[in-house]
Image: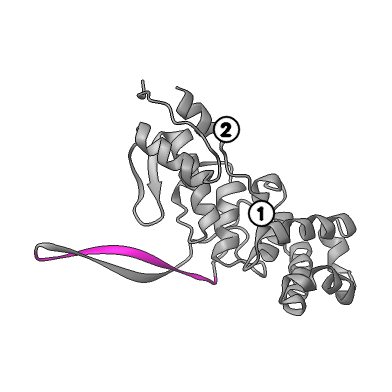
């Protein structure tokens, strides 16, 4: 099954997975990634944790020094304040897996209501489910989605429906290679994957790769 093996090797590489063992670093990374391309944000993230490698170090950092490192990403002053405040609160009240905190953000959940012969799509607003990091500054939907996908050591990732396109690509890949099922952010998990789906997903994950698709079927 060369197509499946090729798909397995086309795993999306996200910084969140690289720092999944440290929720503080994950929250730092997603704060920088929010509204900023990874090619710009990731080097700045590594620069920050090289200079201030722990929550204690960043909590006591000079705001001007932090802002100088991140200002070219945009929103330098507000991001600096958020990063320092995040580190301070993380020290004072670190996340504990056994304690879930109420989330302060909301999700727009796609629903389908049936009206006569037609199925009418609609959007309802729901509070984000509680997590153990929901009390920390900067814990919006993107941060919480990233935490549940990469930091929770169970099937929590299966319940995440992110709006971020890179997280959505990662979940499409993970559902395909781990559960052999299709997935999309509007309908969630679907039917079992087949050859044509894997080929389309390969192209989606690596659009610039000149790959020859196999003429094989799933065994």
Residue 194, given in percent of the width and then of the height, sits at 35, 32
Total marks shown come to 2
Location of the C terminus by quadrant is top left
Q: Which mark lies nearer to you, 2 or 1? A: 2
Q: Which residue is mark 2?
A: 9
Secondary structure mostly seen in magenta is strand
**Residue 96, numbered label:** 1
**Region rendered in magenta:** 104-116
Residue 16 highlighted magenta (yes or no): no
**Can residue 66 be seen from the camera position used here?**
yes
The structure residue drawn at horizontal position 38% and vertical position 65%, both measured from the top left corner, is 109
Residue 131, given in percent of the width and then of the height, sits at 56, 58
* Of the pair 3 and 210, the residue shown nearer to us: 210
**Can residue 156 be seen from the camera position used here?**
no
Q: CA distance from mark 2 to mark 1?
A: 34 Å
Residue 100, given in percent of the width and then of the height, sits at 57, 58
Q: Quadrant of residue 114?
A: bottom left
Crowd band around label 2 with a 10 angstrom C-alpha radius: few (<14), some (14–19), many (20+)? few
**Residue 60, numbered label:** none
The structure residue drawn at horizontal position 48% and vertical position 24%, both measured from the top left corner, is 2
In the image, 161: left or right of 148? Answer: left
State the scheme by which the image is colored: one colour
Residue 174, given in percent of the width and then of the height, sits at 50, 40
The structure residue drawn at horizontal position 48% and vertical position 65%, both measured from the top left corner, is 128
- In what element is the residue under mark 2? helix
- Mark 2 or 1 closer to N-term? 2
Location of the N terminus by quadrant is top left
Crowd band around label 1 with a 10 angstrom C-alpha radius: few (<14), some (14–19), many (20+)? few
- In what element is the residue under mark 1? loop
Taking 131 as reference, is 149 above or below it? above
């Amino acid at each position: 099954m060369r197509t499946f093996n090729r798909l397995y090797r086309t795993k999306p590489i996200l910084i969140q997975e690289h720092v999944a063992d440290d929720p503080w670093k994950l929250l730092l990374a997603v704060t920088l990634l929010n509204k900023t391309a990874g090619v710009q944000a990731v080097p700045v993230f590594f620069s920050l944790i090289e200079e201030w490698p722990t929550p204690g170090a960043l909590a006591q950092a000079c705001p001007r020094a932090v802002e100088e490192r991140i200002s070219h990403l945009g929103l330098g002053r507000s991001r600096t304040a958020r990063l320092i405040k995040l580190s301070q609160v993380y020290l004072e009240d670190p996340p504990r897996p056994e304690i879930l905190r109420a989330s302060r953000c909301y999700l727009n959940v796609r629903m389908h209501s049936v009206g006569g012969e037609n199925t009418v799509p609609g959007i309802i607003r729901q509070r984000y489910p509680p997590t153990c990091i929901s009390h920390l500054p900067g814990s919006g939907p993107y941060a919480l989605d990233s935490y549940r996908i990469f930091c929770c050591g169970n099937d929590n990732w299966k319940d995440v429906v992110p709006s971020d396109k890179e997280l959505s690509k990662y979940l499409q890949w993970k559902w395909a290679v781990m559960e052999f099922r299709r997935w999309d952010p509007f309908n969630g998990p679907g039917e079992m994957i087949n050859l044509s789906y894997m080929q389309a997903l390969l192209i989606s994950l690596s659009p610039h790769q000149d790959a020859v698709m196999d003429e094989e079927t799933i065994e």
